[in-house]
Image: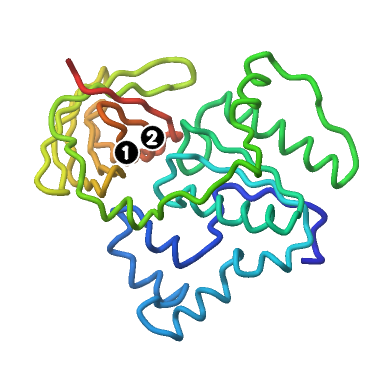
Amino acid sequence: PDVYAAAVAIVAPSNLETLLESIPPYWESFRTVFYTRMGDPRNAEGKAQMKRQSPVFSADKIKTPLMVVQGANDPRVNKRESDQIVIALRDRKFPVEYIVAPDEGHGFARPVNNMAMLAAAEKFLARHLGGRYQESMTEAVAKRLGEITVDPKSVVLEKSAKDSTEAPAADLSGKWIITLDAGGQQILIETEIKQENGSLTGSLLSMFGGGSIKQGVIRGTLVSMNAIIEAQGQQVPLLIEGKLDGANMSGTRSGGGMPTLPFTAARAK
């Protein structure tokens, strides 16, 4: 608590118990590893360890002004993790600022969101550390910063991620059009998904070639799919993870030695 003058927490866990309740489907095989490292919630000793190591239960000891940054669709560190620490600090009337991008996941992939977040962080750090910051920004970045800045007074704790992920799996089967945002260039991927209970398989087709969904899972509305695409004679592994909202989906595509890209998707008509 006495080392730093200010801090910016980006997609940071605050409560290890709720973090492990909401781990994405593709991490399920590592659950025993997490229990070993973080504590096993199935026994009293493990629960005590998790509580001892969770920042939210030591929020009364925090002395450093904090900015919290979160993607609303983060499948790894659920938004509830950030909400909890913001509420804990707000309720003790401690300085906390909150940035939430509704179209981001684990980290910000869209340039305008990144620029807005960095502008806010630079101003925040300058205020608490002293020094300069760049006040000017483009109209688009200024508009976006206003949209993703959250008043801590308005934050309420939503339904737990455990309740969300344990809900019956939504129906993802059928044809989808995935649109990748590659720095202003849109890349369309025609996708056909087959669903059996919560397991997903299927096929992909883009301007680079075809591919397949080898293994995918949907829990509640959280989706993750491990895919392979054929590009110039090579097989490129991809991880597609996002959140389903009715006939639409949003999230990120990563892997294959390429930068993480945001995507939106809609059912094909």
| Number of numbered discs visible in the structure rendering | 2
Mark 1 highlights which residue? 240
Residue at x-position 14% and y-position 41%:
201
Residue at x-position 21% and y-position 25%:
176
Question: Which residue is more in the foreground, 208 or 127?
Answer: 127
Kind of element beneath mark 2: strand
Q: Position of residue 149 (x, y in %)?
A: 64, 33
Q: Are marks 2 and 1 in contact (CB under 8 Å)?
A: yes
Q: Is residue 18 above or below residue 11?
A: below
Question: Which residue is more in the foreground, 91 or 123?
Answer: 91
Q: Position of residue 259 (x, y in %)?
A: 45, 34
Kind of element beneath mark 1: strand
Label 2 crowd bin: few (<14), some (14–19), many (20+), radius 10 Å: many
Question: Which residue is more in the foreground, 159 or 61?
Answer: 159
**Residue 85 in the figure: left or right of residue 79:** right
**Distance of mark 2 from mark 1, alpha carbons?**
7 Å
Mark 2 highlights which residue? 251
